[in-house]
Amino acid sequence: MNKRWESYVMYHQNQELVKFWKEYYQDKPDAKVLFLLGKGFDPRMNNILKLFLENNPGRKLDCVAFDFPSEKDPEENQKLYEINTKKLDALKELYGFGYEVLTIDGTLPWDKRIAQMCRKVIDKELNEYNDVILDVSSLPRAFYFNIAKALFKKMEGDKKKNLFFAVSENVDIDEQIKKTPVNENIEPLVGFRSMSSREANLDRINILISLMGEQNIDILRSIYNHFQPSDMFPVLPFPSKDPRHSDYLMLKYHDFFTEKQFTEPQNITYADEQNPFELYRIVSNMIQAHQATFKPISDHVCFGIALLTSKLLSLGALLIGLEYNKCVAIYNVSSTNYEIEDAGKFEQINQTSEPFLLWITGEAYNEN
């Protein structure tokens, strides 16, 4: 079975990405770009937009910002939110791009907030744009997974328009953000809940693919207990900037593996920490192999993807969710709040953030 992104296009690091943009737009002087980002406290919020504008002066661009205002945010979070907003306003004044804020009602339940946001994305007219860039750097997973899905469905059949996913990756920032997870009422993400009802298929076989990362062990335990898999396949980040990262994660989750009597080392898989397309390929192979293996006894094999990993590798899980939406349930435990200790420290750490751009649909995949 062919994979949609068997061949892929991805750019990372400032120099490589800037080179691509300059070459790409050299022959497209009239191309117009729609840039979507999340408005929040994460210092990476403006990184990629700033890099794009600095290296594409005069480019026709409109920016849409998804805003999730909350009066309950801690003081340090609000401080960073104001800093990021001022930086975005300064970019708007300097480069003169079109700007629109889509405010999401924070008083609504999660599912309704996501539905409200998706309606706004679906209603957005894209006729005037050649390229759409979704920057997930400052967006919660539950939201950007569904924004991406709405854009993907909207643009999938248009070979003249290009859809890109972008992220400013910084594992140190992710680790500095203290999250209070909600472990009650565990359910897959809205929009990625294939076969999630246990009563849906009596002969259903559940396979859990856990993308290992720095999340709390209790999160994986909650996902496991809700999904009730017949088998589990941990995916560890390797190669990694820290060569011992995978070893550390195995030690961290050792008690959980012992508790669940996980004794199948051959089930452990490794994926490049900085290549979501490779993760997509590896998990695609696992899905296709299991579907073929279980075909004689069941057509209902459900794959649960546990998002415990970085924002960059989560994009690999997003690609899986887009292609295998009918047999994949993606689990991400939401947080009630996010806390940071020092806004100034975040600004300093952000200087080492790295940009990644994934080309999802459009000209790069058109057949000759």
Image (tube, grey):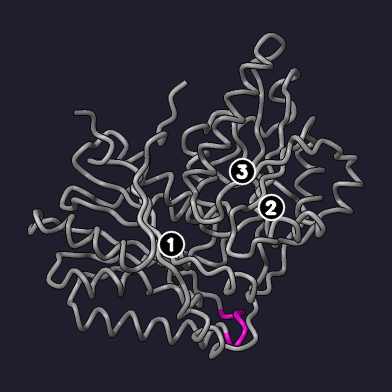
Q: Are marks 3 and 2 in contact (CB under 8 Å)?
A: no
Q: Residue furthest front?
A: 243
* Residue 146 position within the rendered picture, expressed as x and y whole percent measured from the top left: 48, 49
- Looking at the rendered structure, the secondary structure element under dot 1 is strand
Residue kind at label 2, given as amino acid type? Met
Question: What segment is highlighted magenta in the picture?
Answer: 71-76
* Residue 210 position within the rendered picture, expressed as x and y whole percent measured from the top left: 69, 45
Q: Quadrant of residue 38?
A: bottom left
Q: Are marks 2 and 1 in contact (CB under 8 Å)?
A: no
How crowded pointer 1 is (Cα within 10 Å; few <14, some 14-19, many 20+) is rated as many
* Residue 124 position within the rendered picture, expressed as x and y whole percent measured from the top left: 29, 52
Q: CA distance from mark 3 to mark 2?
A: 14 Å
Residue kind at label 1, given as amino acid type? Val
Query: Was residue 14 drawn as part of the magenta stretch in this picture?
Result: no
How crowded pointer 2 is (Cα within 10 Å; few <14, some 14-19, many 20+) is rated as many
- Looking at the rendered structure, the secondary structure element under dot 3 is strand
Q: Residue at x 73, y 24 (%)?
A: 205
For the stretch drawn in magenta, the main secondary structure is loop
Q: Which mark is residue 212?
A: 2
Give above or below for 349 relative to 332. Answer: below
Residue 188 appears left or right of 95: right
Q: Which mark is residue 167?
A: 1
User: Of 247 and 73, which appears nearest the observer?
Assistant: 247
Give above or below for 16 relative to 85. Answer: above
Q: Which mark is residue 330?
A: 3
